[in-house]
Image (cartoon, rainbow, N blue to C red):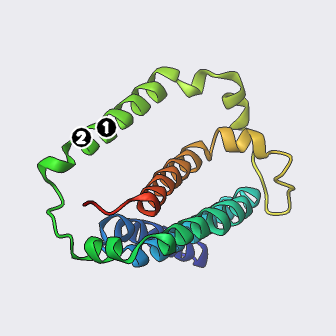
Amino acid sequence: MNIEQVVFYILAATVLSSAFMVVFNRNMVRSIFLFFVTLFAMSGLFIYALADFVAVTQLIVYVGGMLVLMIFAFLLSSKTILNTSATHKTSLIGLHHLPGMLISLLFFLILFVTIHQANPEEIGWVRNAGNNTLVASDNTIHAIGINLMTRYLIPFEIISVLLMMALIGAAHLARRTKKQ
């Protein structure tokens, strides 16, 4: 095993473990900072895939912009909300989580069926993109459109959906009013 593989496995393990801890951590502050680690390691994986433009875009837009927005929403939320969310103990799988789990399963089923029916190997520009190999000295900005819509489409879309969910959660926390 060479050094490139070791670094790749370290980055991949960092992405998976920090993303897992973001989802299952009850402390909101730790989740926000672990999300930062996840996004930063993902940009490292993009650099490893010779998608330096996507990596820099992710650092600037997602890590620099969206994460700061979530931190501000966290800071604007009232102290009583933070105290109640820290003491809120529920099981991971319960009846109150059923609608969210059903919507998530439906979303992934629709995504899987759409990808399966699209048969991307038969689309001409996808077939031509398979011959598009890059070396480290190439200018990747020229090929970013084709590569982003073929090879890196799934990770880019997954991170955009996760960021949208995080933004909705941050807005919900910032706008929540005290029940009387």
Q: Between residues 94 and 125, which one lies in front from this camera angle?
A: 94
Which type of secondary structure does the marked residue at label 1 adopt? helix
Which of the 4 quarters of the picture holds residue 29?
Answer: bottom left
Q: Between residues 168 and 119, which one lies in front from this camera angle?
A: 168
**125 w.r.t. 70: above or below:** above
Q: Is residue 166 left or right of residue 96?
A: right
Q: Which residue is mark 2?
A: 99
Which of the 4 quarters of the picture holds residue 120?
Answer: top right
Q: Which residue is mark 1?
A: 103
Amino acid marked by disc 2: Pro
Q: Is residue 173 left or right of residue 57?
A: left
Q: Residue furthest front?
A: 180
From mark 1 to mark 2, how far is it between C-alphas? 6 Å
**Percent of width and height locating residue 77:** 44, 70
Would you say residue 167 is visible in this rendering? yes
**Percent of width and height locating residue 18:** 42, 71
**35 w.r.t. 169: above or below:** below
| Crowd band around label 1 with a 10 angstrom C-alpha radius: few (<14), some (14–19), many (20+) | few
Q: Residue at x 58, y 27 (%)?
A: 121
Amino acid marked by disc 1: Ile
Q: Residue at x 38, y 73 (%)?
A: 28
**28 w.r.t. 42: above or below:** below
Q: Residue at x 33, y 41 (%)?
A: 104
Which of the 4 quarters of the picture holds residue 137?
Answer: bottom right
